[in-house]
Image (cartoon, grey):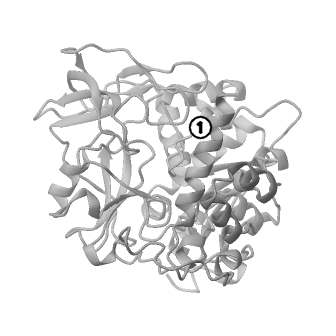
Amino acid sequence: MTTSSFNLAHLLRGTFRQGIHPPDNKQFTAARPIERLPFPPELILPLSQHAGKPSVSLVRKGQEVVRGEPIAKADGFMSVPLHAPATGEIADIRLMPSARGPMVESIVLKVYPGDPQEILFGTEVDVDAMDPREIPGAIQDTGLVGLGGAAFPTHVKLSVPEGHSIHTVLINGCECEPFLTTDHRLMIEQAADLVKGTKILMRALGAERGIIGTEDNKLDAVEAIQKVLRPEDGIEVKAVQTKYPQGAEKMLATSLLGIEIPSGQLPYTVGLGVFNVATTTQIGQLLPMKRGVIERVVTVTGPGVERPGNYLVPIGTPIRFLLEKLGFEGTARHLIMGGPMMGGTVSSLDTPITKGCGGLLLLEEHQLTSEEQMHRYPCIQCGACVEACPIRLNPCELGRLANKARYETMAERFHLMDCFECGSCSYVCPAAIPLVQYFRVAKSSLRERRAAG
């Protein structure tokens, strides 16, 4: 790319206050095109791999299914269906390991070896002729959830409460989490589908404007998207400063538009609809063919893997299979599902890739922080965490209250529930105090108490 073919002067370089600059470590996979891996002999498909109620199985043990066929239905509005990622036979429906730790009810699908694995379900539809009010239901039928990690059902985000309207759709391509490059590659390789998905979301929400935002360490993605945009699309692509956590929806709204989403509020309250690049790209691919989510791109990287890259794999692929194909001989202790800032270690290598998993980070022993190394020293009130927090909380005081289990005070006086667990405070803490883990425990306890009344 040269400045003669791409005028960098027109790029927006907005940002937000505070935040951090960890090494991005994206050089291992950013230039590697997406590659499809072979299908594993067996897929593990949790019925609960999204926020809300689990799907309800439609199949029985011994039943043959074909690739793309619905195998579980949505259980109400806050739920989505599940589709067969491969042609094969239902081997079992039983409790299996999950990314979060607990065993969950899962469909075990034995993949037929040698099958061409054609997608046999789906009917071509004219999305442009579809009533905008029908789009959320059609998206729910695809089983699509937020592929950036939250796994929140996408159709629910399209159900804007009465009295609110959306003027701008923001597509989040910042991918600020170190090591991960899934969204980067999708923006380069599947820009047309990304734009198509953005237009569908704009129609569904009645938005006149669309903005695809990314960081300025991905200018090749900006150029790829600009090549497929037309003036009549009403869509722009803009780059903001590279900084963590630029990809958080509150930070992106500030950086791109100067709009601050108020404490305790969601983007629709300020007229915004915010969606991830991977989610939007799948909308552009699936809706015109009336198909379901059956696969996703995953970044597998880190010094512990021989063949780092971006791989297209069926939903339900066991992590163990991936690691065997890419050359890794460590243990689950060395493995983070997601990125180093917001991801978590998995409890078993039999854990499957789910819809919300965009990356596997494989670290070496010396890169891991042990429990003995955490909190070896007391807080010295240095204020580094306060300076780092992107939403300007006081992590130091929150940590002190967490140690005393004063969770209600944390929420009422210090806005604990505004914390989106980016990990910036833990990253800068010189005492290695695991602040974000304290906050997760506190928030979980508060939710349980409030649910119990």
**Which residue is found at the position 61% from the left and 51% from the top?**
442
The relative height of residue 193 versus residue 56 in the rendered view (above or below) is below
Which amino acid type is shown beneath numbered disc 1?
Answer: Thr
Q: To which residue does mark 1 refer?
A: 154
Residue 49 pos. (x, y %) = 44, 36
> How many C-alpha atoms fall within 10 Å of the one at disc 1: few (<14), some, or many (≥20)?
many
Report the front residue among 336 and 85: 336
**Which residue is found at the position 37% from the left and 36% from the top?**
294
Residue 380 pos. (x, y %) = 63, 83
Left or right: where 20 falls relative to 373: right
Asked whether the viewer can see residue 217, the reply is: no
Q: In which quarter of the image is residue 422?
A: bottom right
Asked whether the viewer can see residue 371, the reply is: yes
Residue 108 pos. (x, y %) = 24, 28
- Give the quadrant of the C terminus: top right
**Which residue is found at the position 29% from the left and 78% from the top?**
366
Left or right: where 91 falls relative to 106: left
Report the front residue among 2 and 84: 84
The relative height of residue 282 versus residue 220 in the rendered view (above or below) is above
